[in-house]
Every structure is written in C-alpha cells, then in structure tokens.
Image (cartoon, rainbow, N blue to C red):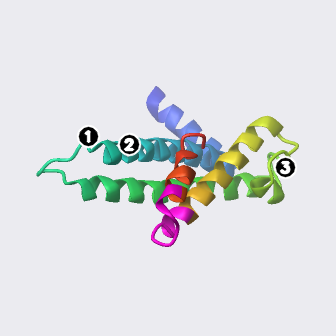
Amino acid sequence: MTIALSTTQLADSFNTAPLWYTTRSTAIVGFVLLTLTTVFGIAATQRALASRAWPRFATQNLHRNLSLLGLVFIGVHIVTSILDTYVNISWWAVVVPGTSHYQGRWVTFGTIAFDLLLVITITSLLRTRVPARLWRTVHWFSYAA
C-alpha cells in the first residue's frame, strides 16, 4: 500500500514539474554514460578487454556509441534546463562560461565541460583529417570534462 502511494505521489509530482525531473534524470544518465565512455576509451587504448571473444574494434565501437548516446542525454539536459521556468538559464550560458545568474559556478563548470565535449567530438569526427598528435592532445581534455 505504501509503495503504491509513493508511486502515485511520484507520478503526481512528475506531472506538475516534468522538465525539472527530466533535467535531473538526463544529467545523471548522461554522466553515467560519459563515465562508461571514459572507461571503455581507456580499455581500448590499454587493450585490457582485447581477446578473441571481445576484439578491440568492439571496445572502440562501444566507446564511440556510448559517447554519442551520452552527448544526446547531455543535449536533452541542456535543452530542458533552458526550457524549465523554475530557473532562468539563457541559451548564451550554454556556450559562454560565467554568464548564468543561477548557480553560476556549477553552470560555468557544465558550460566548460560541454564546450570541451563539443571540441572533442568535432576533432574525433575529423580524426582522419587532423594530425594524430593534435587529436590525442584534444582527446586528453575529456578527463577535464
């Protein structure tokens, strides 16, 4: 009975503030996915998982696909943060660090991390056209993000 009551209360609260819950949940899922991306990226470079049962390209593909899925969740997190009327975060604060009046330090950290992830993604998509040393140097910034 109490489980059903708490589920009903949760459903009611989600109905009153869907963007608030979507913003928080997509942030958590995106963070977990990008953490897994880092783990599989390290595993791909160290060949930790490489074997006949799990070839290296599988680790690299998992790393790539998890990173793109993580970016989708982070993108939804950003859009719902801007659309939510509970706080006032402008589109400008997504790109320019330090311009948000709401939780300035934390939004600034998120903006810097997102900007770094964009640069890392763009250079990764252009990996065959940029020098390997540049790509590797830029990719090291994923730890900061």
Identify which residue is drawn at 41% across, 58% down: 64
Identify which residue is drawn at 84% across, 45% down: 98
Identify which residue is drawn at 61% across, 50% down: 22
Q: Which residue is mark 1?
A: 48
**Label annotation for residue 40:** none
Spatial separation of the CA atoms under disc 1 and disc 3: 45 Å
Task: Say whether residue 88 is left or right of residue 12.
Answer: right
Q: Are marks 1 and 3 in contact (CB under 8 Å)?
A: no
The residue positioned farthest toward the left in the image shown: 52
Q: Which residue is mark 3?
A: 88
The boundaries of the magenta stretch are 123-133
Closest to the observer, 145 or 140: 140
Q: Earlier in the sequence, mark 1 or mark 3?
A: 1
Label count reads 3
**Disc nearest the viewer among 3 and 2:** 2
Give the class, few, some or many, for how many residues have Cα within 10 Å of label 3's Cα (few <14, many ≥20). Answer: few
Closest to the observer, 87 or 69: 69
Asked which quadrant contains residue 122, the reply is bottom right
Q: Position of residue 128 (x, y in %)?
A: 45, 71
Is residue 103 visible to the viewer in this orientation of the structure?
A: no
Q: Amino acid at mark 2?
A: Ile
Q: Position of residue 140 (x, y in %)?
A: 53, 46
Q: Amino acid at mark 3?
A: Asn
Asked which quadrant contains residue 8, the reply is top right
**Label annotation for residue 42:** 2
Residue 66 sits above or below residue 5 on the image: below
Closest to the observer, 132 or 10: 132
Closest to the observer, 2 or 129: 129
Q: Position of residue 108 (x, y in %)?
A: 77, 43
Spatial separation of the CA atoms under disc 3 and disc 2: 37 Å
Q: Position of residue 112 (x, y in %)?
A: 71, 47
Identify which residue is drawn at 80% across, 48% down: 97
